Amino acid sequence: MYDVVVIGQGLTGMLSAIWAKEHGYRTALVATGSGKILQSIGVLDLIPGANGGLKEWSELYQLAAIEQSQLTEAMEQFKVLTKRIGYPYKGNIEHLVPIVTGSGHIKQTALYPETISPIKEHGQVIIVGFDEVIDFQPAYIKGNLQKSRPQLSIDTIKISLGKQSQRTMTQLDAARILDQKENRDHCIKQIKQQMAEREISQPDLFIFPASLGVENWTDTLEQFTKELGANVTEAPGMPPNTTAIRLHEKLKKEAIKLGVRFYVDTTVVGCKMDGPVIESLTFKTSNHTTNVSGKQFILATGGILGGGLEVTSDGVRETALKLAADANGQLIHCPENLYPVGAARGSSVTHNGITGGVYSVLSSHEMVGKLHQQAIIGGFRSA
Amino acid sequence: MLEIILDELTFDKCLKCNACVSSCPVANTTLEFGGPKHLGPELKRLMNNQGLIDDKRIELCTLCGSCDMSCPENVHVSTLTAFAKAFHSEKSGTKFRDFVLSNAEWVGKLASAFAPVTNLAMGMKPVRKMMEMVMDIPAERQFPKYRFHNFNRVYKKKTASTERKVAYFAGCYATFNAPEVAMSFIKVMEHNGIEVVKPDQKCCGVPMFANGQMKQGLKNANHNITSFLEYTRQGYDVVLTCTSCTLAFKKEYVSFLNTEEAKELASHVYDADEYLRLLKESGELNMNFAPMNERAGYYAPCHMKAQGIGNPAMDILELIPGFKIQDVGAGCCGQCGTFGFKTEKYDVSMAIGRPMAEAVKEVDADYTVTECGMCKNQLDQLTDKTVKHPMQIVAESYERATVLD
């Protein structure tokens, strides 16, 4: 019997589980796969794919009721957590910053890890790609970036990581290579050599793939910044992005160390109800059907892109518990002890199919707060 | 010719998102490995309705199952890689060493029959140098000790008369290397008024699957299924103390064979701690635990995580008064069954294991707890902490409580 059972291992699921456990609740997390953080680029947007600020966001997401203090508290809590796990996020929701992506487009984001630096209107940048990583092409990125930053002077450099691989190398593979100092030395030497040969002057910013180290990202960032004599940024693009991998791995390790129980490679197939409340969750693991009982349940299965909602010819369907949903994906009769968070709350809190990290953080924070309130006032309903 | 049975386990859902590659302990350590995505769903896609392709890179797959756990689309990648391994062995042959390593039961029988001599010889440098030269088994790799008084010699019970009855699958490790684990489990069950029988059994087949010996592995699987179904049909529950054998019974037999019998058996199979947790939930668990003022670090084997059962070992050990246990939060150990015993894979095995050793060091507990004998082998080699099976601790707590009474 758990106090809290979280379904889903994306950003909302992971944060909900960690924060519930921090409140002292016996917490379980049930998930099919490793969640969608791995497919993301590891930054937290307000409105994904759009440039609107707080006002537009709260209108679009119908967040009129949200108190400013709650929002500030949620962002602060996320920053404290990421700092504690050794992967601090910076930025704030009032002032979005422009960052460059792995396709050379500019996007506005709210919170981002220290390996990312905003991109300015003027000045000079150098885009550095690796011969081995085909998902990141400096010339292509330059073409796109130049369109939105006409006053920026852009050079491109391609260097070799000097490694043979038996598979198509990704940004993550490059990051693991750059975890080692001798490989970083080798890269810096080539960059300097090419700058000298092609008479490229010292830039304000170096743009790399999302590859600046996994475990040793602080050393990588420090060495590159210092020895290249300029700011350095990662431009995340095609998954796996190391910006996102670091967040996922560190959050997961934190959750495990706190004592959250993970039930992975499972498929939720339904639940047992006792009147208006859920008594236990039924899920399948290979050929086993298991029931996990709990007092409160958090539905963090995502929206249509995350797999929590499905569009069928009969309308929108909730996929885990098979509950009826309206045209926006909102549950019609939500059990009393079930709390949908993030994109699982329906299409009114998504844009271009995803919530954007800021809403995920807010939603998890708010929900765990509600659980806590319920526990203090009425005690957990014993199912 | 091998037939790849996939049934509902489709690879079509693969989006090539790379979640499996970024979660693969081997891919994260060496660029020599083709990776689960490339050698699983992509290779299968390439071969569909065409000839099978023999890909040597599959040798580095350990069948740890991390890919299955990571896949957001529920593609059973490891089933595909297991068949790729089998096809590779069939086409390219099996090294004598891999044949020996995959026959853990046969080795166990022989090694334990001459146990004092085997252990002595395995500890001698010239012997190990010779083994490295002839067999490609690295001289630096520590081996588990073999016991003359193996579990087969000391425990032969075939019928039980208690209300709850357990049919125990001991596995090669508890049989030949660690009979104390098997005996602890039997004691724990005794303290709960449950009699344990040991049905006729063969090696679960995991080392065979991992070395591409699919046919032999499936032969063993069918043997065990027939033998244990006889018991489950009389109301016995099947319980195991080795997480790799448990995963084979629960998942691999079903995925590889896809027979009704395999499915029927799987629904009766429990990990030992999972079983105790079930007893606890139904109010049947003997709660007379003596306090143990010890602090342990828990290391979760991949094949425990892959069962999707939470963390039953910690759930049970936390019931012991005074006992403190902390998950060290580490990934794969790198031993991966027979993988770490091979010269060409030794460096990769060590490199995978290092973060685990650091995590154990960081928690700095009195000792480490893990269910898997092979993970223990790597922990023994890479850390200076003693390693215990959860059943040994539970048994000790029960025993102390009996003395106190």
Image (cartoon, grey):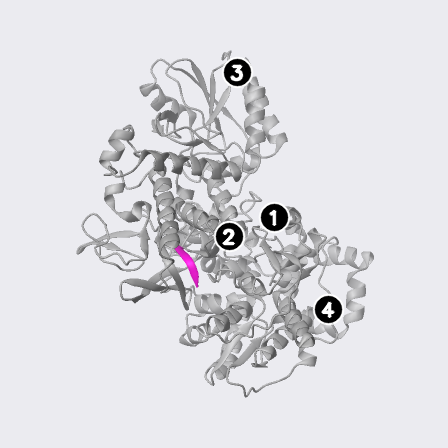
Q: Are marks 3 and 1 on the same chain?
A: no
Q: Residues within 10 Å of mark 3 (few under 14, many from 20)?
A: some
Q: Nearer the viewer, residue B405 or A204?
A: B405
**SS class of the residue under badge 1?**
helix
Asked if labels 3 and 2 touch by Cβ distance under 8 angstroms, the answer is no
Which mark sits nearer the N-terminus, 2 or 4? 2
Circle 3 sits on which residue?
A195
Q: Nearer the viewer, residue A342 or A204?
A: A342
Q: Which mark is residue B146?
A: 4
Q: Position of residue A294 (x, y in %)?
A: 39, 61
Q: CA distance from mark 4 to mark 1?
A: 26 Å
Q: Amino acid at mark 1?
A: Ile
Tag 2 subunit: B
Question: Of circles 2 and 3, which is in front?
Answer: 3
Q: Are marks 4 and 3 on the same chain?
A: no
Tag 1 subunit: B
Q: Nearer the viewer, residue A216 or B24?
A: A216
Q: Which mark is residue B352?
A: 1
Q: Residues within 10 Å of mark 1 (few under 14, many from 20)?
A: many
Q: CA distance from mark 2 to mark 4?
A: 35 Å
